[in-house]
């Protein structure tokens, strides 16, 4: 009896210990997050000119990712999108799953209407994405093998890039090819493409895209390059090595796309470290595009005023640092309004996630009102050095 009671006491004691430790951690975290908020910070903006105009005034472009359903029926959204954005990128409609119902056909309905929309409103158009591990249709996994993969990729790129040749400002040719945890010395993600074509698949895809549209900027797009952390340090190094290797073999690559999916509760952004990475990319003769910027606020306090201030601070700190680098030519947020954000969805199905409160990661709220995040982006453009670039003139033609 004594023994069991003793063990019970020990058990309860250690449970109590773990409990207090967890409680202590939670308290410390919430203190850190509270410290991210400065209630006196106003994010004052001069005038009401749009983000695209503030960007273009500095020779930059600003735009956002968009879905066909938000543009086809939501008139108020369309008006705001046209007012704020000088470039659009289809969030879904240029991916294999959307374009390729089967191995022998293409479905361009939605991509065509987005391209037409961009043209009708004098917007630049980004292509996203030609080679990625995700959003590959079922038939790809069943029917594509090392014997037919090059021909299938060649046909895909020739048809898709060729169709929009001359309309596309820049293509994300390869997306998210680095994954350190897969254990390769080159840091490459063990994707289906790597398994079937070997590490040269990246160079091959860029060569194919350059042939299909010699005008488009060809981009390698990646996430996890933002913070002063061991993981992001390793990923930045692996991406630099990848880019150096591609450049040394003459791959027609023109830019690095930095997705910039930021976390509002992160305290690890180091502007100096981030800027030195940008300088190293620029030293390879590459441009840089911030391609999918948003700030996740899921772990922030529910209080909207506080949450909006913390999100705005993350936007302003990050973009102010990024735009100091002359090689950065433009910024896109991954969505324009909180009404349409991937962060609130299950990415495998597109269905809404059960969240404690509705997220506010983007420049406009769900009713398309400008938020402090909008002010923060506007302030970053207003304080950015002016680029000697033709992009600004094109946008305001
Ligand atoms: O449109 C179909 C609908 O017809 C169908 O009924 C439904 C259920 O299967 O799926 C709908 O498609 C969804 C699509 O988003 C459009 O909403 C897909 O399931 C869903 O997987 C897809 O998620 C997208 C995800 O990439 C995967 O392609 C997200 O919206 C999109 O924001 C996200 O974007 C990625 C970038 O491409 C790369 N960088 C990271 C970023 C966030 O994960």
Image: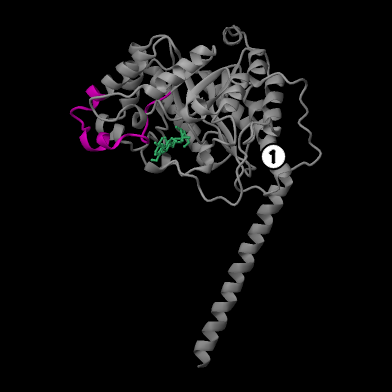
* Quadrant in which ligand 1 is drawn: top left
Q: Is residue 200 left or right of residue 216?
A: left
Q: Is residue 349 left or right of residue 80?
A: left
Residue 94 falls inside the magenta stretch: no
Q: Which residue is mark 1?
A: 308
The residue lying toward the viewer, choosing from 117 and 234, is 117
Q: Could you tell me which secondary element the residue under label 1 belongs to?
A: helix
Q: Quadrant of residue 276?
A: top right
Position of residue 76 measured from the top left corner of the image (x, y, whole percent)? 60, 27
- Residue 258 in sight: no
The residue lying toward the viewer, choosing from 65 and 327, is 65
The residue lying toward the viewer, choosing from 211 and 87, is 87
Q: Quadrant of residue 133?
A: top left
Classed neighbour count for the residue bearing mark 1: other residues with Cα under 10 Å, few (<14), some (14–19), many (≥20) = many
Position of residue 260 measured from the top left corner of the image (x, y, whole percent)? 55, 32
Quarter the C terminus occupies: top right
Residue most extreme to the right: 40
Please tell me which residue is depicted at 66% across the width and 15% down the height of the picture.
53
Q: Quadrant of residue 132?
A: top left
Q: Is residue 178 above or below residue 125?
A: below
Please tell me which residue is depicted at 52% across the width and 83% down the height of the picture.
7
Please tell me which residue is depicted at 77% across the width and 20% down the height of the picture.
47
Please tell me which residue is depicted at 33% across the width and 11% down the height of the picture.
211
Q: Which residues are magenta?
A: 128-152
Residue 137 falls inside the magenta stretch: yes
- Residue 103 in sight: yes
């Amino acid at each position: 009896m004594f023994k069991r009671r003793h063990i019970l006491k020990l058990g309860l004691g250690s449970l109590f210990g773990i409990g207090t430790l967890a409680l202590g951690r939670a308290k410390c975290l919430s203190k850190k997050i509270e410290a991210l908020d400065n209630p006196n910070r106003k994010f004052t903006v001069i005038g009401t000119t749009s983000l695209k105009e503030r960007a273009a005034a500095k020779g930059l472009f600003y735009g956002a990712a968009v879905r066909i359903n938000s543009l086809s029926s939501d008139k108020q959204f369309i008006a705001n999108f046209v007012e704020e954005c000088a470039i659009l990128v289809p969030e879904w409609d240029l991916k294999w799953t959307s374009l390729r119902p089967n191995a022998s056909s293409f479905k361009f309905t939605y991509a065509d209407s987005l391209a037409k929309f961009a043209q009708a409103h004098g917007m630049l158009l980004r292509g996203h994405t030609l080679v990625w591990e995700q959003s590959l249709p079922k038939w790809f996994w069943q029917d594509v093998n090392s014997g037919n993969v090059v021909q299938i990729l060649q046909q895909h790129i020739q048809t898709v890039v060729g169709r929009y040749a001359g309309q596309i400002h820049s293509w994300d040719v390869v997306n998210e090819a680095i994954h350190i945890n897969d254990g390769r010395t080159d840091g490459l993600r063990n994707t289906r493409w790597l398994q079937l074509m070997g590490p040269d698949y990246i160079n091959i895809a860029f060569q194919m895209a350059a042939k299909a549209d010699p005008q488009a900027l060809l981009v390698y797009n990646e996430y996890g390059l933002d913070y002063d952390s061991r993981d992001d340090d390793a990923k930045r190094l692996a991406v630099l090595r990848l880019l150096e290797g591609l450049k040394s073999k003459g791959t027609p690559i023109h830019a690095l796309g930095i997705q910039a999916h930021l976390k509002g509760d992160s305290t690890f952004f180091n502007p100096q470290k981030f800027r030195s990475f940008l300088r190293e990319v620029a030293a390879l003769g590459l441009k840089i595009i911030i391609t999918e910027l948003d700030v996740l606020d899921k772990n922030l306090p529910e209080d909207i005023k506080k949450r909006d201030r913390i999100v705005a601070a993350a936007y302003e700190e990050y973009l102010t640092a990024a735009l100091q680098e002359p090689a950065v030519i433009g910024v896109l947020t991954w969505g324009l309004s909180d009404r349409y954000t991937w962060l609130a969805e299950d990415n495998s199905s597109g269905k809404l996630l059960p969240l404690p409160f509705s997220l506010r990661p983007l420049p406009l709220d769900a009713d398309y009102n400008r938020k402090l995040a909008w002010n923060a982006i506007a302030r970053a453009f207003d304080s950015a050095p002016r680029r000697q670039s033709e992009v600004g003139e094109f946008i305001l033609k």
